[in-house]
Amino acid sequence: MGNKLKQYIKNLRAFLEREEEIKDVEAFKQELFREIQFWQHERLIHLLVTMLFALLTMSVLLVMVFQASIALLVLFFMLLVLLVPYIRHYYILENGVQTLYVIYEEVCRRNSTEAVPGACIPEEYGIKIKPFSCENKK
């Protein structure tokens, strides 16, 4: 999954760096938004799995404090061996989704007259965000 996300971001950046005119900007933004939603779901699932393994690992460590056993030590190291790649994979997913957010905002800025993020959120989802204003109201 991590390689797939990295490849998707690489292809997306290469496409945007060509500075070609996007024929249907709204369709492009909708497709990118949908892809972000898929990766957010993937990230959530991996967060839950990572948290489960972290809790199991810490629980076994806590039990080992009160009852020393070779079997518990082996179980602890087995869980630790699984936990480290899960943390790494979640890290890749998190950074990838954050990168997709930045790309999405760049596409919105490039092709919209409205302020970001209001211009980037599709109205069909019922989310209304007022554009950010730097003006001081007196």
Image (cartoon, rainbow, N blue to C red):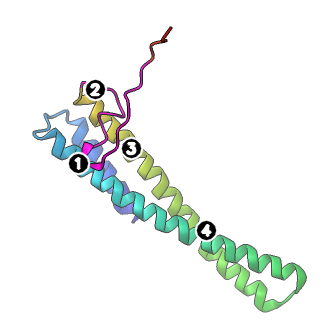
Q: Are marks 4 and 2 in contact (CB under 8 Å)?
A: no
Residue 62 shown left or right of residue 13 in the figure: right
Can residue 2 be seen?
Answer: no
Q: Secondary structure at mark 3?
A: helix
Looking at the rendered structure, the kind of residue marked 1 is: Gln
Among the 4 quarters of the image, the one containing residue 128: top left
Q: Residues within 10 Å of mark 1 (few under 14, many from 20)?
A: some
Looking at the rendered structure, the kind of residue marked 3 is: Tyr
Q: Earlier in the sequence, mark 3 or mark 2?
A: 3
Residue at the extreme top: 138
Q: Earlier in the sequence, mark 2 or mark 1?
A: 1
Looking at the rendered structure, the kind of residue marked 2 is: Glu
Q: CA distance from mark 4 to mark 3?
A: 24 Å
**Residue drawn at the location 46% of the way across and 58% of the way down:** 93
The stretch in magenta equals: 113-133
Query: What main secondary structure does the magenta stretch of the protein show?
Result: loop
Q: Is residue 67 above or below residue 41?
A: below
- Where is mark 4, residue-wise? 51
Q: Residues within 10 Å of mark 4 (few under 14, many from 20)?
A: some
Among the 4 quarters of the image, the one containing residue 130: top left
Q: Earlier in the sequence, mark 4 or mark 2?
A: 4
- Residue 53, image x and y in percent? 62, 74
- Where is mark 3, residue-wise? 101
- Where is mark 2, residue-wise? 114
- Residue 14, image x and y in percent? 26, 43
- Where is mark 1, residue-wise? 30
Q: Earlier in the sequence, mark 3 or mark 1?
A: 1
Among the 4 quarters of the image, the one containing residue 63: bottom right
Q: Nearer the viewer, mark 3 or mark 1?
A: 1
Q: CA distance from mark 2 to mark 1?
A: 17 Å
Q: CA distance from mark 3 to mark 1?
A: 13 Å
